[in-house]
Image (tube, rainbow, N blue to C red):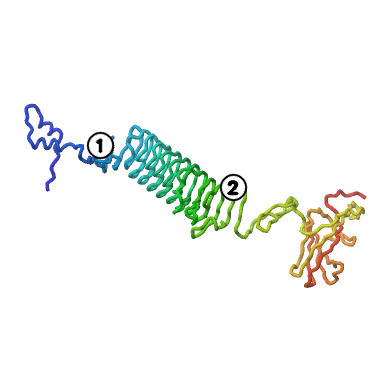
Amino acid sequence: MEKKEITTKDELKTYFETGKYPTQSQFSDFIDSYWHKEENIESQETLATVVNRDNKIPEQGIKFFQSGTTPSTRVELRFNPKTWSQWFGNMNPDHTGIYNQSLGFGALQEITTGSENVALGNHALWKLTTGIRNTVVGSASMNALKEGYWNVVVGQASMYYFVSGTNNTAVGRVAMSNFIGGYGNTALGSHSGFVDGGTLHTQDYNYNTFLGFRSGYTTDLPNNLKGHNNVTIGANAPIGGETNNKLVIHSSEAVLNHNTTLPLIGGDFVERTLDFDSSLKVHRLPQADSTFTKSIVAKPDGTFGLEEKTNSNIYCNETLTGNYFQIDSEYKKPIYRSLIIDNISETEPGKSIELETLNIEHVFINGTARIGTHSYNIANAETLSVNFNHADSLLDFVQINGQKADWSLHIILEYTKATDTPIRL
C-alpha cells in the first residue's frame, strides 16, 4: 500500500485563497493534517527531529505514549524551563519545586512543591509531594513517601511503606519495609531491618541500625522489632518485639527466634552492659606492674566486677623487728618480717609468689642475705627441697626432688624495703 504524502501548510493555504472553492478532497487533506481531541496524540518528534532543530526539545517534550483517558498515563522525555526539572517518564508537569529529576514510569508522579529530589526506577518516590533532597534508586522504592527530607534509598522496594521521615538510609532489597516513618535509621543489606511476615509498624521508630543480610530478623512472627536506638550486626542477627537501646552481634545461616537465641555479643546502650555467649580469650594484654591496683573477679552467672588487688599468697602480720641489719659498711636499714602461707602440689613443677607490693630490696633467711638461686629446706619437710630465687618482685619455689605429695610452704621472710632511707653508720 502506497503511503500518502503529507500536504504542506503552504499548499493547504492555496486551497482557501480568495475566489477559490475547496474541493471535498482538499477539505479532507486539511482536516487530516490536524489532531482531533478524541484522538490519541502521538508526538511526531524523534531524536532526529530534535537534532535537526539544533538539539532543542519542544516545551511539551517528546511523548512516547499518551493515554487519551488518563493524562498521567504517559511516557515523555521532558525538561521544565521554569523549575529546571528533567524527567523521562510521567513526572507531574505542573510541579513548582525546582531541580527534580526522575527516570521511570510513576517516578515523582505526584510531586508538587518538593525540590531537588532524584528518583530512578518505576514508581520511585511515587507519592512524594513536598519532600526535599531525597535520593531513591530502585523499582517501587519509597513509593509511599509523601513528605520527607534527605533520605537515601537504593534497592528494589526498599522502605516501601515509608510515609514520612528524615535522614534515613536504606541499601538493599526491601530494606526496612516494615517501617512507616522515622528519623536516622540505617539499613545495609538485602532484607535488612525487614521481617517477611512481620506486622507493619503503626508509629515512627528512630535511630535503628541494621548491618547484614536479614539483619534484625526473627522467626517469632509477626512479632518483629518495634523500638528505637537498636543496633544489629550480622546475617540473620535476631531482634524483635518492643525493644529499645539493644546491641546484637551475631551471624547465622538460618533465621532465628530472638526470644530463644543468645547472640554472640549483646548489650544495652542505656544500662551500659555487654554480654558474651562465648569463651573469652584476650590477646596482647600489657604486663601488669605496681600501677595495676584492681583485680577482675566473676560471679557464678558470668558477671565480672573489680576489687582491690591483693597478692596471690597470704601475708600475715608484716612487722618491723626494731633491729637493724648491716648490709655493708656504708648504711643499714630496718628489717621487716612477714609470714607466707601457700601450697605447692604434685601437679605444679613450680610456684611463684608475688612480692612486688612489699617493695622488697633484700631478703634474709637465717640472718643471711640471699641473692641468686639457692636450695632451702623447709621446716618439717626434710625430703622436700625447693629452689629459691629473689628476682626483683618474685619468689620462685620449684620442686627438685620429684616429691609426689602436696606440701604447704610455711615461710618466714625477713627483708629490707627499697623505699626506706639508708641510715649511715
CA distance separating discs 1 and 2:
64 Å
- The residue labelled by disc 2 is 269
User: x, y percentage for residue 114?
Assistant: 40, 36
Depth check, front residue: 328 or 187: 187
The answer to which of marks 1 and 2 sits earlier in the sequence is 1
Q: Residue at x 83, y 55 (%)?
A: 361
Q: Residue at x 45, y 42 (%)?
A: 151
Q: Which mark is residue 324?
A: none
The correct choice, above or below, for 83 with respect to 300 in the image is above
Q: Could you tell me the amino acid type at mark 1?
A: Arg
In this rendering, position of residue 54 left or right of residue 315:
left
Depth check, front residue: 167 or 360: 167
User: x, y percentage for residue 182?
Assistant: 48, 42
- The residue labelled by disc 1 is 53
In this rendering, position of residue 315 left or right of residue 89:
right
Q: Secondary structure at mark 1?
A: loop
User: x, y percentage for residue 414?
Assistant: 87, 58
Q: Label 2 crowding class (10 Å Cα cut-off): few <14, some 14-19, many 20+?
A: some
The reply to whether residue 392 is in sight is no
The correct choice, above or below, for 387 with respect to 209 in the image is below
Q: Secondary structure at mark 2?
A: loop
The correct choice, above or below, for 173 with respect to 38 in the image is below
Q: Could you tell me the amino acid type at mark 2?
A: Phe
User: x, y percentage for residue 232?
Assistant: 53, 51
Q: Label 1 crowding class (10 Å Cα cut-off): few <14, some 14-19, many 20+?
A: few
